[in-house]
Amino acid sequence: MAGFILRRLLQLVPMLLGASLLIFAVIRLAPGDPYSGLVDPRADPAKIEELRRRHCLDCPLPQQYWRWLSHAARGDLGTSIRFRIPVAQLIGDRLGPSIALGVTAQSIVLLAGIPFGILAAVRRGTWVDAAVTTCSLAFLAIPAFFLGLLLLRFFSLGGLQVLPSAGFTTPGSLLTGPARFLDAARHLILPATALGVTGIAGLMSHVRSAMLEVLRQDYLRTARAKGLPERMVIYRHALRNALMPVITLLGLNLPALLGGAIITESLFQWPGVGRLTYTALLERDYPVLMALNLLFAALTLLGSLLADVGYAAVDPRVRYE
């Protein structure tokens, strides 16, 4: 397994280089130059030209790409046009809130999607299956931002008014320790619920389909014939093999832990990577966009690797030599 992981990590290097080249090309094909927002268009042309030389914009494109890539490899992702601070620092400040939101939302998805998917498969053809499937379709039809608006209406801006509507913590709060943690948790409830509930449907459908396929296998009939309890047959033998497509889904969802909540983070004014991506798009903050896309590409490749490792962990038939 260690040899397989090492080989896959080495294979990720050229793939990440290819992704970086594509990201650079797309940004450079955008109208204008990446640093046009740093100076007043009415400024002295000599000053504008000096700025272009400083950022190597008058160099050939291959040289520009190598300069950006070599700096990125050293952790220098440039300076944000909008915020005028290093991009690495800007993204680093947003990682914590995004990870908290993403992990909480994914936890909601797992804790609800897997059990209800199993329940629908085991009770196939009954009213339980119909109810779970109907709820799944309803959740699938509701966009996260629309559910977020409903949650804001009933739990924050109107109705009960028991939860905060925006931010990561209360503005101007001097809370520390457990009190600060609880304050952040209250702010996390609405955006995490909006993301998690809308994500339950996809996982629930995958688990149900996988369980239905596994439950037809002969080895489960053999397990029942040996007198094993039904709970052991389902959770020890069937579920383990049914998790294969779930692992794929979770691996591909790894980038969503950081940047998959652009609209939701903007709606709840959550200071995360998703909201930063939205701001960078509006402001044409190209250094930030390039760094974020490179980060998302790396997370996608890493998610694929983790999915392969997960296959071997849950299925003894899978062996990587």
Image (spheres, rainbow, N blue to C red):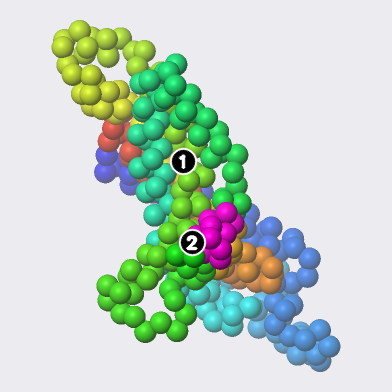
Quarter of image, res 35? bottom right
Camera-side residue of 106 and 13 = 106
- Specify which label sits upstream in the sequence, 1 or 2: 2
**Residue in the picture at 46% in, 30% down:** 132
Quarter of image, res 247? top left
Q: Could you say where residue 191 lies in the image, as x and y percent from the top left?
A: 49, 58
Camera-side residue of 258 and 201 = 201
Q: Could you say where residue 89 lies in the image, as x and y percent from the top left?
A: 47, 76
- Report the side of 188 relative to 282 (left or right): left
Camera-side residue of 128 and 285 = 128
Q: Which residue is mark 2?
A: 160
User: Does residue 150 belong to the magenta stretch?
Assistant: yes
Mark 1 belongs to which amino acid? Ile
Which region shows up in magenta?
149-159
**Residue in the picture at 53% in, 60% down:** 159
Q: Is residue 307 above or below residue 318?
A: below
User: Does residue 74 belong to the magenta stretch?
Assistant: no
Q: Is residue 152 above or below residue 37?
A: above
Secondary structure under tag 1 reads helix
Q: Which residue is mark 1?
A: 200
